[in-house]
Amino acid sequence: MSAVKLAKWCIFTVPINEDYLANPNTPRDWHCQKARAGRGALGDLAAHVVNMAHFLDGNIDEVSGDMMTVIKQRPDLKNSSQLRDVENEDQASALLRFANDAHGVIETSRIACSSKMGLTYVVAGTKGSIRYTQEHMAELELYIHDKPARHQGFKTILTGPAHPDYAAFCISAGHSIGFNDQKTPEVRDLINGIAADDRMWTDFAEGLQVSKVLEAIALSAAEGPIPS
């Protein structure tokens, strides 16, 4: 991130929306049960975003959150004629304040129609921005604010052998690698970490920190909004 000279970070914006429970007739499974899943979209999806935020921009100091269960009941998994309560949130959002004083906004939904892997992040700094969308995972958009106004805009960078881990899969740029391909470097790093007794990241300490942020968002949401 520092190599592209975004200068001081201003805002980190990340939606992670999917539609795997958008159909209200989809039966209530374990995702909707608090005893088995805990949180809903916040725990299932936003956990990845918080982890990503920590990696890209450091620790999160303060949050302000909101959560909502839109589809209150779903058919029973074994008896579709019976409706069962949905016990956790369908969607959530939060404002973040990072330790470096950057501002962040995250949103997550499991009922956002049309979103299949709707993870997008935008990092905006005082001298440029980066934008990435998981559904187009071979592309990274870069904006550097040093051009004349008539030439300003994002440019698309296609992943290739010059980027970490890509060359092991393909010698040509733009051919891209898949979601499952990414698991190979993950397993490599795990094995190397164990063999060398090195600290690996993400680790259990990071998992705990992510959980603390999610619980803080849920607590903020439970306390309710301030009337305007």
Image (cartoon, grey):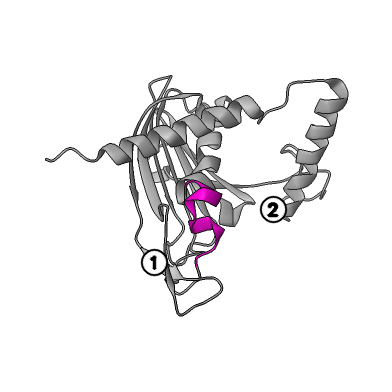
Q: Which residue is mark 1?
A: 73
Are the residues at dot 2 and dot 1 in contact (C-beta closer than 8 Å)?
Answer: no
Checking the image for residue 179, the label placed there is: 2
**Magenta segment: does it hold 37?**
yes
**Magenta segment: does it hold 191?**
no
Is residue 28 depicted above or below 140 in this figure? below
The amino acid pointed to by label 2 is Phe
Say which of 64 and 86 sits in front.
Answer: 86
Residue drawn at x 42%, y 60% as measured from the top left: 86
The amino acid pointed to by label 1 is Gln
Tag 2 secondary structure: loop
Q: Is residue 53 visible?
A: no
How far is mark 2 from mark 1, CA to CA?
33 Å
Relative placement, left or right, of 76 versus 101 is right
Q: Position of residue 38 (x, y in %)?
A: 50, 46
Residue drawn at x 52%, y 26% as measured from the top left: 5
Residue drawn at x 24%, y 40% as measured from the top left: 224
Q: Position of residue 42 (x, y in %)?
A: 46, 46
Tag 1 secondary structure: strand
| Image quadrant containing the N terminus | top right
Say which of 72 and 148 sits in front.
Answer: 72
Q: Position of residue 216 (x, y in %)?
A: 40, 32
Relative placement, left or right, of 13 versus 57 is left
**Image: magenta residue range:** 28-39
Dot 2 or dot 1, earlier in sequence: 1
